[in-house]
């Protein structure tokens, strides 16, 4: 194939190009860096999708959210609805890369890059979000829990383009938080991350989601942690049990950023911080965004 | 096959033909010929290559040049007015924010983006915003003083 580059103006343009073998690029913050690091060489045929106006935007839909695939992390963290009601997602987008990454990096590219360390993945998973994938053959919706299959791999067909992410409305009295362990304050990749989403009703936890990041081949929920919280009073014992479950539910790798043993030990600490922050927000207490900074130095 | 495009760099349009894999940094340095922006890590870690794209900071080493077609690119050469340095550049010199100078073009761009978004940053705001720009000489204190000094002076950046 001859090396080529086109700029799609409409979704149809993009789908036609992708259908004939081109790969999409939006912010390029993962694609180009991945090529530099030797993960995969740059595609021979590239179609830029970042000028397709209909793929942008963040819209509140029946109390939930439609995130256009081109919504940037900068737009997400500035969005008042997300900060108030989907705080964990704002926590995550606030700490992705640096201000340069957040200005250009899109939520769609982030999700389809399928990194087990992506900050925004845990929050989207815990909010029960789904991905809308479109190809020239049609459109389908895939829950994020069924999209990621391993580091860098998804169930999407190469001819499909992620066009948007749908997030259902959370219940009243829901609080959420994403916390990561980091060594550097920008351009960092999670050493360990955890997300918690909890709903309170009359002092009891009626709904709980807990997910771990950079601790398994994909971002994944920890049902044992959720079960420890759901039905509890959200007190110290339930929090401790849930946090321990996040540790035992981890199967991390050892790499330059941390050993498997260190990551597993830190999983419990970081999960505890995320759960405590989510419960505080559900009670209406202020935990500033990003929660990673707000909870740094919190006792384990 | 090279693809024709127009790069608007510091207000001047350049008609160029670029390989689809060429980075914006390479295009600006080797095709346009402006070498102020530096290649440090070539991996989005160090920020030495930072430019403004339609006013937003971008790590140009990791951005495909053709994506910048018809967009406004600002490099460090676009900050000064001829030989007249802008206040942020003068503050870097006065406060010891420059030693070897390799990180300086990206630092200046990153600090410009910060001050346009947040005209009154705290020390911590400056340190966080510039954490994507590595400096191995100054220890950062002079840079932070320079950025905060410009903010305190109320000068437009």
Image: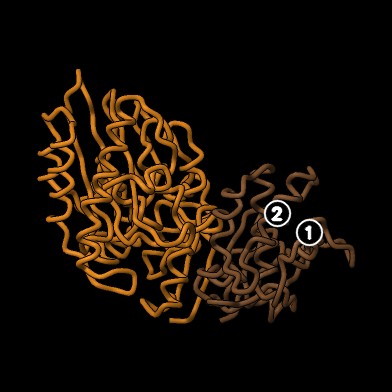
Chain colours: A orange, B brown
- Check the image and report above or below for B71 versus A203: below
Q: Is the N terminus of chain B in the top left, top right, bottom left or bottom right quadrant? A: bottom right
* Residue drawn at (24%, 65%) of the image: A262
Q: Is residue A62 left or right of residue A198?
A: right
Task: Work out whether residue A167 can be spotted.
Answer: no
* Residue drawn at (22%, 64%) of the image: A150
Nearest the viewer among A30 and A17 is A30
Nearest the viewer among A241 and A53 is A241
- Label pair 1/2, CB-CB below 8 angstroms: yes
Q: Is residue B97 left or right of residue A121?
A: right
The subunit letter for the residue under badge 1 reads: B
Q: Earlier in the sequence, mark 1 or mark 2?
A: 1
Task: Work out whether residue B38 can be spotted.
Answer: yes
> What crowding class fits label 2: few (fewer than 14 Cα within 10 Å), some (14-19), or many (20 or more)?
many
* Tally of numbered tags: 2
Label 1: which residue? Answer: B91
The single residue placed furthest to the right in the displayed view is B83
Residue B30, picture quadrant: bottom right
Give the image location of residue B99, x and y in percent. Answer: 71, 74
Give the image location of residue A179, x and y in percent. Answer: 34, 48
Label 2: which residue? Answer: B147
- Check the image and report above or below for A15 versus A282: below
* Residue drawn at (40%, 57%) of the image: A109
Nearest the viewer among B125 and A221 is B125
Nearest the viewer among A16 and A119 is A119
Indicate the secondary structure of the residue bearing disc 2: helix
Give the image location of residue A27, x and y in percent. Answer: 50, 59
The single residue placed furthest to the top in the displayed view is A202
> What crowding class fits label 1: few (fewer than 14 Cα within 10 Å), some (14-19), or many (20 or more)?
many
Residue A288, picture quadrant: top left
């Amino acid at each position: 194939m001859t090396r080529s580059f086109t700029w799609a103006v409409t979704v149809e343009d993009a789908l036609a190009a992708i259908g004939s073998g081109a790969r999409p690029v939006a912010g390029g913050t993962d694609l180009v860096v991945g090529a530099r690091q030797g993960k995969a060489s740059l595609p021979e045929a590239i179609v830029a999708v970042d000028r397709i106006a209909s793929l942008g935007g963040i819209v509140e839909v029946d109390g939930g959210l439609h995130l256009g695939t081109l919504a940037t992390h900068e737009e997400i963290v500035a969005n008042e609805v997300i900060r108030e009601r989907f705080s964990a997602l704002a926590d995550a987008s606030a700490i992705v890369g640096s201000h340069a990454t957040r200005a250009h990096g899109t939520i769609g590219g982030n999700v389809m890059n399928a990194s087990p360390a992506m900050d925004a993945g845990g929050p989207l998973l815990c909010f029960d979000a789904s991905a809308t994938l479109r190809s020239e053959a049609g459109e389908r919706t895939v829950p994020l829990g069924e999209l990621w299959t391993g580091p860098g791999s998804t169930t999407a067909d190469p001819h499909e383009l992620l066009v948007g992410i749908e997030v259902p409305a959370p219940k009243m009295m829901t609080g959420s938080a994403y916390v990561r362990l980091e060594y550097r304050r920008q351009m960092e990749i999670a050493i360990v991350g955890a997300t918690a989403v909890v709903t309170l009703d009359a002092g009891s936890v009626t709904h709980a989601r807990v997910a771990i990041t950079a601790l398994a081949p994909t971002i994944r929920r920890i049902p044992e942690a959720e079960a420890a919280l759901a039905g509890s009073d959200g007190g110290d014992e339930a929090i401790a049990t849930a946090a321990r479950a996040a540790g035992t539910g981890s199967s991390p790798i050892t790499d330059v950023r941390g050993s498997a043993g260190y990551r597993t030990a830190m999983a419990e600490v970081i999960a505890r911080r995320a759960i405590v922050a989510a419960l505080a927000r559900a009670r209406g207490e202020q935990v500033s965004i990003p929660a990673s900074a707000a909870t740094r130095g919190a006792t384990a | 096959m090279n693809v024709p495009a127009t790069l608007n760099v510091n207000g001047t349009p350049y008609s160029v033909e670029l390989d689809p894999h060429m980075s914006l940094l390479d295009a600006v340095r080797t095709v346009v010929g402006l070498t102020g922006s530096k290649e440090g890590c070539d991996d989005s870690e160090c920020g030495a290559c930072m430019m403004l794209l339609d006013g937003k900071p971008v790590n140009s080493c990791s951005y495909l040049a053709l994506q910048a077609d018809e967009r406004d690119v600002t490099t460090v050469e676009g900050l000064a007015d001829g030989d007249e340095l802008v206040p942020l550049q003068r503050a870097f010199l006065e406060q010891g924010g420059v030693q070897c100078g390799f990180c300086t073009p990206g630092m200046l761009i990153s600090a410009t983006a910060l001050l346009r978004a947040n005209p009154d940053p705290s020390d911590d705001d400056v340190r966080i915003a510039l954490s994507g720009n590595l400096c191995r000489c100054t220890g950062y204190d002079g840079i932070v003083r320079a950025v905060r000094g410009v903010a305190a002076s109320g000068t437009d950046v």
